[in-house]
Amino acid sequence: MTSLRWRPAKLGFALALVPFLTVGATAQILVSANDNKAVLVNGANVVPANPAADTVSIIDLGVSPPKLIGEVKAPASVVGPPQSVAISRDESVALVTGAFKVDPADPKKAIPDNKLSVIDLKAKPPAVIATLEAGLGAAGVSINNAGNLALVANRSEGTVSVFTVAGNKLTPAGKIQLGDSKSGPSHVAFTPDGKSALVTRDGDNRVSILTIDGSKVEDSKAFMVGGVRPYSLEIGPKGDVAVFSNQGGGQGDIDVINVIDLKAKPPRIVDTISVGQTPEGIGMSSDGKYVAVSVMNGSNRPKDHPAFNDFGLLQVYSVSGTTLRKVAQTKVGHWCQGAAFSKNNKTVVIQCMVEKNLQVFDFDGRNLKPAGTVPLSGGGAGLRTAAR
C-alpha cells in the first residue's frame, strides 16, 4: 500500500474547445456532471457571482490517459451523493440530476431543484434530448440492467421518482414516499436482477428496500440501520453484496463505510470499516473485486478548523465475499466527489470540486500511481460508468 502526494494540475485548455472524438470499440464511457454554481470559500459552499452554466463531460475511460469525447450543458449539483449520473448498460443514454439551482429571488442562494436531463450519448456530438422533472432535491439516479426502468432519489421531499424507459425516451410512472420530507433519500441502486433496489436515507439513518415487478415499484417497508447518514451506495455485479458510506455528524470524527450481505434473508449489514472524515463517493469495479472510496479528510473545512487537512484521500479496498481489505491509499485534491474504475481495473479516477479536474491513477491491485489529470469545465460533482 502506498501513500503518494497529490500535485495540482495546470489547466491548459478549455474543454468547450475540444472537438468531438470518434470512439473505438474499446471505449468505456465515463460521465462527469460539473457544478459551476458552487465554490468552496474557506470551508463554505458559496454561490459565485454570475456562475457559468453547469456542464456534463463525456469521457473515454478505455484509453490511457482518459480522453474527452464531448460536452453538453445541463443542470448538475454537488449537493447529494456523486451518483447523480447514470448510464445505460449499452452506453447509449446518460441521466443527470440537478438537485439545486440558483434562487431566482436571491442570486447568492441555492434552492432545491427537480431536474433530470436525458443525454443521447450516441449523437455526434452528444446532446441533451429531454429535461424532465423528478422531485425536489433530485440526487442519486440509476437505470436497471434491462434498460427499461430508472429511479431517482429526491432528498428534499422524501420520495423516489419512477420512470419507464423505452430507448432514449423516459416517461414518469409515479413516486414512492419514504418517510417524511426530512428522511433524505440520497441514492437508489438496482440489484442486478432488477427485482429490488436499495435507497440510502441520510435524514433518518436508514437503508430502505424497494420491491420491483415490471414497472411497479413499492416500498417493502423493510429497512436496515447502519451508521449516521447513509449516503453513497454501490451493489456488486453478482447481487450478493453492497457497500455504502456514512456522511457522519460533520464534527471531524472518523466516519465509516458499511457492507450489506444481500444473500441474507432479509439483507443485513454485516461489517463496518473506519475510513476517515466524510467518505463521499463509492465506486465499485465492474467485476466486483474492488471498491474505491473518496474521503473528504477535512479538505472541505475552514483552514483554521482543527480537523482540516490540505488534501483528500482516495482509498481502494479488495472485496472477498462480505469482507473488505484496504489495499491502497493516496492523497488527492480538495472537496473530491465521485470515483470510478476502468473496466480492466487498471485505472482509477476521482473528481475534485476545487481543482475542477479528474485525477487519474494507475492501479496494479496494490498501489495507486499518479497518471495525470483531465480538466473539467466546472467542479466535478457526479461521476459514473455503465454497469458491466
Image: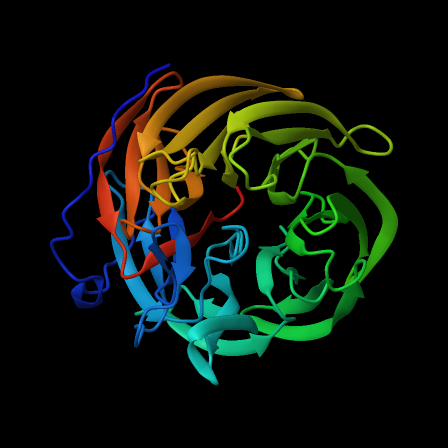
Q: Quadrant location of the N terminus?
A: top left
- Image quadrant of residue 139? bottom right
Q: Residue at x 44, y 38 (%)?
A: 296
| Vertical placement of residue 162 versus 41, above or below | below
Image side of residue 167 versus residue 298, left or right: right
Image side of residue 340 versus residue 289, left or right: left
Q: Position of residue 342 (x, y in %)?
A: 39, 37
Q: In this orientation, which residue lies closer to the viewer: 16 or 38?
A: 38
Q: Residue at x 49, y 18 (%)?
A: 326
Image side of residue 24 versus residue 168, left or right: left
Q: In this orientation, which residue lies closer to the viewer: 166 or 57?
A: 57
Q: Position of residue 96 (x, y in %)?
A: 49, 63
| Vertical placement of residue 20 versus 320, above or below | below
- What is the image's colouring? rainbow
- Image quadrant of residue 172? bottom right
| Vertical placement of residue 55 versus 221, above or below | below
Count all numbered tags in the image, as a single digit: 0
Q: Residue at x 82, y 43 (%)?
A: 223
Q: Residue at x 66, y 20 (%)?
A: 321
Q: Position of residue 289 (x, y in %)?
A: 53, 25
Q: Residue furthest bottom?
A: 105
| Vertical placement of residue 33 versus 319, above or below | below
Does residue 290 appear in this view?
no
Does residue 351 appear in this view?
yes
Q: Position of residue 360 (x, y in %)?
A: 29, 37
